[in-house]
Amino acid sequence: MWHHRGFRRLWAAATVDACGTWLLVMAVPVQVYAVTGSATSTGLALAVQALPAVLIGPWAGALTDRWPRRVVLVGANVAAALGVSILLVATSADRVGYVYLALAVENLAACFLRPALQAAIPAVVTDPADRASANALLATSHSALRICAPLAGTYLTAAGWFGAVVVVDVVSYLAAAAIIAGLPLPATTRPAGGALGRPDNPRPGAGTLDRPAGPHPGGTRLVDELRQGWRLVVHSRILAGLLAGSWLYWTANAALTALLVPFVVHRLDSSGQAVGYLVTGLGVGYLCGSAVSRTVLLRSPHAPSSPSRTRWSEFVF
C-alpha cells in the first residue's frame, strides 16, 4: 500500500489524529473523577461524548456528501482541536462544565470527520483490490495506538500532566488538518437533480440515486436520503443485525466505562493508570482482530459482506 502517495498522506493524518484521541479517551474520565470525586459527573462526561453521535450522526453523512471532502476533513480537525483546547481551563470541580462543552464540540466535529475519512479511502485507493489492505492497515495502526496511547494518557494524568495530554491532542488534530490540506482528493459532484455522483468523470448513470430530476428543495432532499437510508437498513438483515448488535455493544460499553474509573480508583484503591492497563487489553484484542480481518477479506474480496461471514463476525463479536 505504500506505493499510493495519497494513501500514505491519508494514513499519516488518520494515525496522528488517532494518537491524540486515544491519549485522551480515558484520561478525561480519570481527570473528571480526580477533580470531582463523583461517579455521576464521570458518567455524564461519557454521555456528553455520545450525544452528538445520536443527534447529529444520522445527518452528518448526508451533509458530508454535499461538501468537498478536503474542506470537511480539515474543518472537522480544526474544530475538534478548538473544542479539546477548552479542557485546559477545566482545572477544578466548579469548572467541570467546560469539560462537557469541550467533549460536545470535539465529538460533534468527529461526527463529520469519521464519514468523510471513510469516504476518502475509495477516492484515494482507486483499485478495489487494494482497499481491503488499506482498511486493514488503518485498523492495525489504530489498534496499536489503542494499546499504548490510553496507558500513556492515564499515566500522565495520574501524574498531574493532564494539560500536557490535552496539548498533544490539540496538536495532533492540527497536524492531521495540515497533512490533509495537501491531499489531492477528487471533487464529489452532485448532478442537477441532486443525486450524488462519482468523482473522476463518472460513467453516465453511475453512482446516482434514482429520483426525479428538476428542482428539489435541499432540506426535502436531505430528509428523503435519510428515509432511503433507514429503509435500506430496515430491509437488510445484515445491516439490521449490525445495527442491533452495535446498539447493544455500545450501550453495555457505555455503562461499563462509566463505572470503570470509580470502581478501579475507589473500590480497588488503585490509580488512574490501572484504567490504562485495562484499556490496553482492549487494544490487544483490536490488533488481533484487524490482522485476522485482512486475511478474511483478501480470501474473498468479491464478497466482503456475505451472510455467512457476517454471522461469524457477529458470533466472535
Image (cartoon, rainbow, N blue to C red):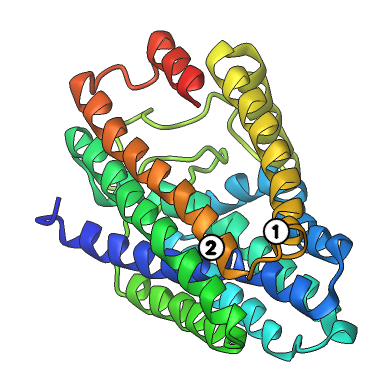
Q: Is residue 288 left or right of residue 237?
A: left
Give x and y (percent) for residue 194.
57, 41
Mark 1 and 2 residues: CB-CB less than 8 Å, in contact? no
Q: Circle 2 sits in a helix, a strand or a loop, which is it? A: helix
The answer to whether residue 71 is visible is no
Residue drawn at the location 31% of the way across and 55% of the way down? 141
Give x and y (percent) for residue 106.
64, 68
Residue denoted by label 1: 268
Residue drawn at the location 38% of the way across and 28% of the way down? 205
Q: Is residue 93 left or right of residue 281?
A: right
Decide: is 240 above or below 224: above
Q: Circle 1 sits in a helix, a strand or a loop, which is it? A: loop
Residue drawn at the location 67% of the way across and 47% of the way down? 57
Could you tell me the amino acid type at mark 2?
A: Gly
Decide: is 275 above or below 122: below
Q: Residues within 10 Å of mark 2 (few under 14, many from 20)?
A: many
Rendered image quadrant of residue 26 = bottom right
Rendered image quadrant of residue 202 = top left
Decide: is 125 above or below 266: above
Could you tell me the amino acid type at mark 1?
A: Leu
Foreground residue among 62 and 301:
301
Q: Is residue 73 left or right of residue 268?
A: left
Residue denoted by label 2: 276
Give x and y (percent) for residue 271.
63, 70
Residue drawn at the location 29% of the way across and 66% of the way down? 12
